[in-house]
Amino acid sequence: MLRVRHLLLVLAVVLLPRALAAQSAPIVLPLDYDGRHLFVTVTDQHLGPLTLMLDTGFQHTSLTASIAEKGEVHTRFWERSLSYNGFGTGKAKRRYLTADVSLRSGPALVFMGSALVADLGDLNKTFGHSFDGFLGWDFFRKWCATLEYAPARLTLRDPAQCSAPSGAYASLRGEWTPQGLLLPAQLTFANGHNATALLHFDTGSDIMLLLNTRFRGPAGLDQNSSSNESHGTGVNGTYTTDLLPIAKIDLDGQLQLNPGKDAVIAVAHAGAFTTVHWWEGPSAVRVNRDGVLGNALLDRFRWIFDPGAKRVYAVPAGEK
């Protein structure tokens, strides 16, 4: 019986692109934008209603262990490691467990495949919003997805129907990797110093911009002292940063941002980011090497993810 179930799952995953292509009408998912985090409610036939954080910064769609254990959990013995790429000074989680899911919004199928079984620790308590896992980058790679923050909603279309928007927009190519979307950036700090960065597009982060330790020098921060210390929580635990203003952010030479005098970014202390093993590939090593763009900046725009063209289009909020 177990073998039959796995065979059916393989067939379903193979047929999923055809199912998406047959979905001609857009699927609109209402979102809850709370505390600068995005949440969506979907349903799995076996697990019931699920509240998931919409997180382009998490490579795999994931479920908490307490939810996944209501169904069947599989151990992936052939995987060498898991490596939750992300911020936090705690020990990285390495156990690789999966659960088969078929996620729907109403009658519409939005994701089918294997979800990681994740240890979220105290993230529910930290974020002040109960959720059952992450709808990750593997989900975004399957759809032409339009993300809007006001009103908060995610519109899904067949990737073959994706196109650039009309009106004012910026077209950003970046790097579409299996781990996430990386955008090249030119940063100008308040002290006038410039630095280049490759930034991870991360809807799971609430901050405007979180930079790794190597940017402390250009930002004018001493390596061993703090000026405006702050503490954050990532997938691997807590970490420490310094907050400071930034003068300008230029994304891919196409989108120039002047965040404003009251806007602040965070620059991490040493050890804030959990590194990964070399065998996970160069894109995995680079994915959070420099830093992440979060919702405090992203919510200024409507974003259209075009997986066919491997571009993301940024439309200023309020533009039609």
Image: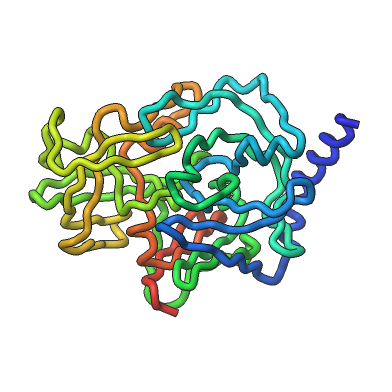
Left or right of 246: which side holds 199?
Answer: right
**Can see residue 180?**
no
Tell me residue 102's x, y (percent). 74, 49
| Color style of the picture | rainbow
Viewer-side residue, 230 vs 201: 230
Q: In this view, does 83 lie above or below 193?
A: above
Tell me residue 91's x, y (percent). 43, 24
The residue under the point 61% across, 64% down is 156
Viewer-side residue, 72 vs 291: 72
**Can see residue 314?**
yes
Q: Quadrant of residue 264?
A: bottom left
The residue under the point 61% across, 26% down is 96
The residue under the point 40% across, 27% down is 90
Q: In this view, does 218 lie above or below 34?
A: above
Tell me residue 213's x, y (percent). 24, 33
Q: In which quarter of the image is residue 319?
A: bottom left
Q: Kindly give the residue lying farthest to the right in the view shown.
A: 1
Tell me residue 220's x, y (percent). 10, 40
* Quarter of the N terminus within the rendering: top right
* Quarter of the C terminus within the rendering: bottom left
Q: Kindly give the residue lying farthest to the left in the view shown.
A: 191
Left or right of 21: which side holds 139?
Answer: left
The residue under the point 36% across, 28% down is 89
How many marks the image carries: the answer is 0
